[in-house]
Image: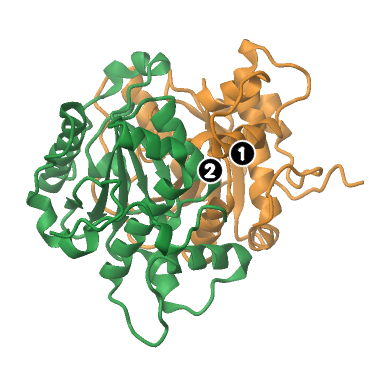
Amino acid sequence: MSTRIPSSSLAVRVSLVAAALALATLAPHAAEPEQGAGLARLRAGNDRFVKSATAPMPAGAASRQSLVKEQHPFAMVLSCADSRVPPEYIFNTGLGELFVVRAAGEVVDKSVMASLEYGAEHLHIPLLVVMGHESCGAVKAAVESEHGEGPNLEYLVQHIRAGVHFNPAEKIELRTAILENVEEAINDAMAGSQILRGAASAGHLQIVGAYYELGSGHVEFSEPVGLGTHAAHK
Amino acid sequence: MPDLRPRSHRLAPVLILLAASASLASFSHGQGVPATDPLLRLKAGNERFVRAVADHAPVTLPSTPIEGAPTATVLSCADQRLSPDVIFTAAPGELFVVRSLGEVADRAVVASIEHSVETEHVPLVVVLGHDSCAVVKTATDSRATALSAHIDYLLKAIRAGLPRSGPDQQDVRRAVLANVEQVINDVLGASPSLRTAVQGGRLTVVGAYFDAATGQVVFSEPVGLTITGWH
């Protein structure tokens, strides 16, 4: 685990936890037009999904031949591997539109990091969404069980626990832990990757946190993440 | 963390994938496989997708979430041209999906798969490569250099599975299949609990290959744990 850094040197802080409830109505004012358009596309797609989970995929079979050669994803999504949260369904996108990286608890490890860097650097994807979800089993295991079973699961548990202020003595609300874990994943990605930091500070890459509600199908977005060293509390 | 790659020995040869992948589409079990067989469900779901592709019809996705454990765990590439949920026309809740570029398995990926098998009791793991995989293609070019340590890790991981003889452009498919095999070896090599599950008959592991032009997925035979190449 090479990406974990002390909290004092974190370059990025998201106000996701504090502001999550109000975020759905916030406009992405800081975004460049094209980046704002990507986020707007995701919001519109999620609206279609919320209204009808059977909304047909917009890019159907007809465009498949063009997919074979061309790569034009408008966003990359880092989300959990949980079977209930396929991003392509939640955002009602067709094939070719989303670059999707998934690991339990959206934990940022080497392959995940490399994937995000590749998306930003080689595919010039202008938007990164790091999405947690309601009732996340991986986060739940991290805040509720003492140890992961075996070294690999223990690694995952420790990774998540580092971001959620785990204290066995006090019960933490699962939703809060999930939002903190999203924040930590963004911090890990930014702190561990010069490529991602460079793309973000040059304005080529917008980064937002998100939270998916299983029951309603609704996705809440955070404000775009800034690269300042202080928290973006209002 | 211990480096998961490269490994000098291979636990789970998937060579049959390389040898027979062209004819696997018509592969049939022929031994009275139960209808609830998770692999058959994936195949049926992919057939729906392939028909939609052939008919230029909209892809209709099931909306009713399935109850209980996911049918399968799929480890695939992050590439936007494929989505395991879509190409298997899976219902929400049906597939546990882990994705990284080149389906390369770091420790979090291995742990994710373990989580699905140990906690959610998923009976089938599919490692899915796809045609024209850009990062595998890059890895086959020995002159290609990485822009960062992370991408270097990815390229090295993929190169570890590639045949030593210099592959040319036409061998991207072969390289993708070799990478699928390497990933399966890495995942099982790094996970005692997954090996135990395979040995105990609780878990089936297969390799697979997605062809974007037709939408078709072909599968390898289930992976065994024959150990080859011990020295």
Q: Where A13 sits versus B100, above or below?
A: below
The mark tally for this picture is 2
Residue at 22% x, 58% y: name it: A15
Can you identify the residue that label 2 sits on?
A111
Is residue B79 in view?
no
Residue at 37% x, 69% y: name it: A164
The type of residue carrying mark 1 is Tyr
Inter-mark Cα distance, 1 to 2: 8 Å
Q: Quadrant of residue A207?
A: top left
Chain letter for the residue marked with disc 2 in the picture = A
Name the mark on residue B153: 1
Horizontal arrangement in the rendering, residue A170 relative to residue B74 (left or right):
left
Residue A86 % position (x, y): 32, 46
Is residue B11 in view?
yes
Q: Which chain is orange?
A: B
Horizontal arrangement in the rendering, residue A95 relative to residue A116 (left or right):
left
The residue lying toward the viewer, choosing from B208 and A106, is A106
User: In the structure shown, which secondary structural element does the residue marked by tag 2 occupy?
Assistant: helix
The type of residue carrying mark 2 is Ser
Q: Where A8 sits versus B113, above or below?
A: below
Q: Quadrant of residue A123?
A: top left
User: In the structure shown, which secondary structural element does the residue marked by tag 1 occupy?
Assistant: helix
Colour assigned to chain A in the rendering is green
Q: Cβ–Cβ below 8 Å for labels 1 and 2?
A: yes
Residue at 28% x, 54% y: name it: B65
Residue A16 % position (x, y): 23, 58
Residue A173 % position (x, y): 27, 75
Horizontal arrangement in the rendering, residue A59 relative to residue B194 (left or right):
left
